[in-house]
Image (cartoon, rainbow, N blue to C red):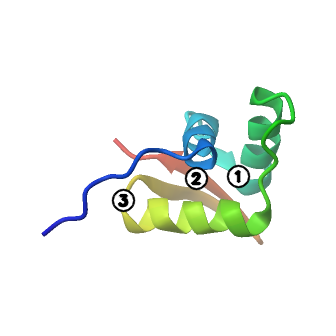
Amino acid sequence: MKEAHQPLTDAVFYILLALRRPNHGYGAVQQVEQMTGGRLILGPGTLYTILAKFQEEGLIRETAVEGRKRTYAITD
């Protein structure tokens, strides 16, 4: 049985918004901070855990890799 989707947390919601256009992790962190007026500041553990889950579920994909910098985009 497939797991039902849970309500979105603030972090999940804003990361998805930050990935409306292809973006890398640090760019997403900066955009979330800007969108929330500094109310939500993502740590690397939170960000990369969510990005890994999104990739596992097929919600996002890597579009480019430059050294350690990975760019992500929302899938169709």
Where 10 falls versus 62 (above or below)? above
Of marks 3 and 1, which one's residue comes earlier in the chain? 1
Q: In the image, what residue occupies the spot 82% across and 42% down? A: 30
Task: Rate crowding at label 3 as few (under 14), some (14 to 19) or many (20 or more) other CA atoms within 10 Å.
Answer: few
At which x and y percent is residue 59?
Answer: 40, 52
Amino acid type assigned to the residue bearing label 2 in the image: Tyr
Name the residue carrying label 3. 58
Amino acid type assigned to the residue bearing label 3 in the image: Gly
Q: Give the distance between the C-alpha atoms of the residues marked 3 and 1, in whole angstroms.
A: 17 Å
Of marks 2 and 3, which one's residue comes earlier in the chain? 3
Q: Which mark is residue 72?
A: 2
Contact check, label 3 and label 1, Cβ < 8 Å: no
Who is closer to the viewer here, 14 or 70? 14
| Residue 18 falls left or right of residue 7 | right
Q: Give the distance between the C-alpha atoms of the residues marked 2 and 1, in whole angstroms.
A: 6 Å
At which x and y percent is residue 67?
Answer: 77, 71
At which x and y percent is residue 2?
Answer: 18, 65
Name the residue carrying label 1. 24
Q: In the image, what residue occupies the spot 61% across and 42% down? A: 10
Q: In the image, what residue occupies the spot 41% across and 68% down? A: 56
- Which image quadrant for residue 17? top right
For the C terminus, give its image quadrant: top left
| Residue 33 falls left or right of residue 22 | right
Contact check, label 2 and label 1, Cβ < 8 Å: yes
Where 27 falls versus 52 (above or below)? above
Element on which disc 3 rests: loop
Amino acid type assigned to the residue bearing label 1 in the image: His
Q: In the image, what residue occupies the spot 39% across and 46% down? A: 75
Q: Give the distance between the C-alpha atoms of the residues marked 2 and 3, in whole angstroms.
A: 12 Å
- Which image quadrant for residue 33? top right
Element on which disc 2 rests: strand
- Which image quadrant for residue 13? top right
